[in-house]
Image (cartoon, rainbow, N blue to C red):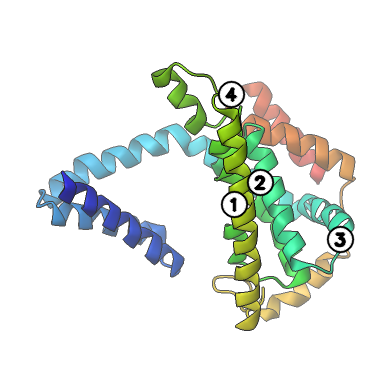
């Protein structure tokens, strides 16, 4: 039992390490699975065909339309200028002097969406097109986005704050006979502690990247400096009214997160696209 658990932990560590090195998940996910199969002396082809592919197909079946609509939503926000409207509004509030303020703003937005019940895999599609103009404007290394995003979306707002609707907080209520508001004092203390520690980490990571001379334009897997002219020309593009962006964005994000794949929701989604264009 100990060996099997150790193998799973090792394969997950390998998956995370290779992902952070920029390798495609299409390659490293089967590689991590093969590692588990090989170290546990399981039949390779049979296990890949039945266990791995079976789980993959079930996952794709359940979440395909969520990812599809969320990806379309993020692309429409970026191409229509809606993300730029939101980003400019944020810059007006926090100013352009502090890079750390931008990272904290990303944390706050991700936390609000997650605590409001929007699934993490939907939040990231909404956050990326908003964060890109912010990071581009202040020339912040793009890899720091993931630190800020997961700080806001996958720590205190997902598992610690009392009443959070995330499944990680809801599932235990079935087995322990509690409510989502259980242990509020412990949750609040843990929230304060994790916010303080992660803020210090964000500050440390930002200083470290600056000392290395890292910028938005020399970040791995991002646009090159040749694209700066393209983004400069896009600043002249007529942007949609902020009120339309704010209302329609909230409605569509909520609809995608709650899996409302009805005719009415698809109609609403198309109206959203029309408004932004």
Disc 1 to disc 4: CB gap under 8 Å: no
Nearer to us: label 3 or label 1:
1
**Disc 3 vs disc 2: which is toward the camera?**
2
**Image height of 96 relative to 258, above or below:** below
* Residue at 69% over, 70% down: 140
For numbered disc 2, what is the local secondary structure? helix
The residue depicted at 22 percent of the width and 54 percent of the height is 7
Name the residue tied to disc 3. Answer: 237
Crowdedness near tag 4: few (<14), some (14–19) or many (≥20) residues, C-alpha within 10 Å: some
CB atoms of marks 2 and 1 within 8 Å: yes
**In the rendered image, the vertical position of residue 198 relative to residue 68, given as above or below:** below
Decide: few, some or many residues near mark 1? Use Cα within 10 Å; few <14, some 14-19, many ≥20.
Answer: many
Residue bearing the label numbered 4: 181
Work out whether mark 3 precedes mark 1 in sequence or the reverse, and give the earlier one: 1
Marks 4 and 3 sit apart, C-alpha to C-alpha, by 46 Å
Comes first in the chain, label 1 or label 4: 1
Which x, y percent locates residue 167?
50, 30
Nearer the viewer's eye, disc 2 or disc 1? 1
Residue that label 1 marks: 151
Residue at the outermost top position: 177
Q: Position of residue 235 (x, y in %)?
A: 85, 65
């Amino acid at each position: 039992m100990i060996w099997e658990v150790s193998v799973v932990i090792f394969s997950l560590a390998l998956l995370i390490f290779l992902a952070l090195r920029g390798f495609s998940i299409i390659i490293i996910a089967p590689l991590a699975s093969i590692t588990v199969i090989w170290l546990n002396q399981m039949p390779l082809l049979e296990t890949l065909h039945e266990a791995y592919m079976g789980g993959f197909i079930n996952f794709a079946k359940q979440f395909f339309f969520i990812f599809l609509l969320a990806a379309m939503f993020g692309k429409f926000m970026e191409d229509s200028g809606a993300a730029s409207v939101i980003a400019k509004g944020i810059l007006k509030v926090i100013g352009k002097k502090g890079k750390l303020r931008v990272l904290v703003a990303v944390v706050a937005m991700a936390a609000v969406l997650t605590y409001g019940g929007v699934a993490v895999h939907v939040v990231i599609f909404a956050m990326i097109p908003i964060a890109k103009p912010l990071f581009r404007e202040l020339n912040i290394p793009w890899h720091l986005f993931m630190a800020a995003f997961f700080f806001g979306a996958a720590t205190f707002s997902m598992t610690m704050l009392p009443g959070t609707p995330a499944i990680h907080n809801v599932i235990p209520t079935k087995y322990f006979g509690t409510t989502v508001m259980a242990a509020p004092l412990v949750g609040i203390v843990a929230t304060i502690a994790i916010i303080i520690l992660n803020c210090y980490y964000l500050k440390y990571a930002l200083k470290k990247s600056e000392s290395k001379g890292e910028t938005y334009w020399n970040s791995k897997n991002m646009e090159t400096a040749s694209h700066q002219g393209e983004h400069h020309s896009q600043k002249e593009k007529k942007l949609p009214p902020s009120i339309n962006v704010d209302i329609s964005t909230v409605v569509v994000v909520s609809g995608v997160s709650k899996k409302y794949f009805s005719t009415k929701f698809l109609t609403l989604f198309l109206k959203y696209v029309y408004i932004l264009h």
